[in-house]
Amino acid sequence: MVEDYDLWQAWVGGDQPAGAQLVERHFLAVYRFFAAKLPDEADDLTQSTFVACVEGRATFRADGHFRSFILGIARKQLLRSLEGRTQILRGRAVSEVSIADLAPSPSTEAAHAQQRDVLLATMRSIPLDLQIVLELHYWNELSVREMADVLEIPEGTVKSRLSRAREQLRRNFAKHGNPDAIEPLAKELQQALAPGRSVP
């Protein structure tokens, strides 16, 4: 199988089939990243992420992992999209507010119909930095080093942020269900957050 780095180099050089193969490999991870936060904008943001990957001529190291690289770009696209919502931010940094604050959904009641949807609603209720680190851990199974690359922070900071995120998720989810069910429910969400699936 052709390595991601070789496909990326070919794509940057104008090889569209190589680009299509690379997008196919990593499309779901990127789409899921946006669907958990801004489902109505997931298609556009996913497309803009892959466009930025090539047009921006970002640096992808041969010894790196493309999944970390593209999710890092996705994070920047998300923050750029959310930063325009100044009427909600009120001077706060985007990463300090929750998606529920930034993009409240009229289908809150539907999100609580099933435990899986309750978990997603709970994830959306915590600060964005914590939500992202949980997704990288549960859905993409990134190592601490890979998460550090995506988030552009030291590995020690990743560990403490992940610990804080898991604790806050368990505490908040315990108000609605059994926190021991978080991991299997997170895996179900991994499957549900795909094109064509209905997620509140």
Image (cartoon, rainbow, N blue to C red):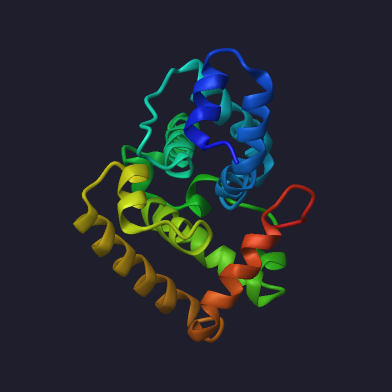
Q: Is residue 60 above or below residue 94?
A: above
Q: Is residue 164 above or below residue 146?
A: below
The x, y position of residue 141, in whole percent, is 47, 60
Number of numbered labels in the structure image:
0
Residue in the foreground of this view, choosing between 172 and 196: 196
Q: Is residue 78 above or below residue 162?
A: above
At horizontal 52% and vertical 27% (from top left) the residue drawn is: 8
| Residue extending furthest toward the front | 1
At horizontal 30% and vertical 49% (from top left) the residue drawn is: 148
The x, y position of residue 110, in whole percent, is 72, 66
At horizontal 56% and vertical 84% (from top left) the residue drawn is: 177
As drawn, is 184 to the left or to the right of 131?
A: right
Q: Is residue 34 above or below residue 199?
A: above
At horizontal 74% and vertical 47% (from top left) the residue drawn is: 195
| Residue extending furthest toward the right | 196
As drawn, is 193 to the left or to the right of 78?
A: right
The x, y position of residue 115, in whole percent, is 64, 77
- The N terminus, quarter of image: top right
Residue in the foreground of this view, choosing between 131 and 109: 131
- The C terminus, quarter of image: bottom right
Residue in the foreground of this view, choosing between 129 and 102: 129
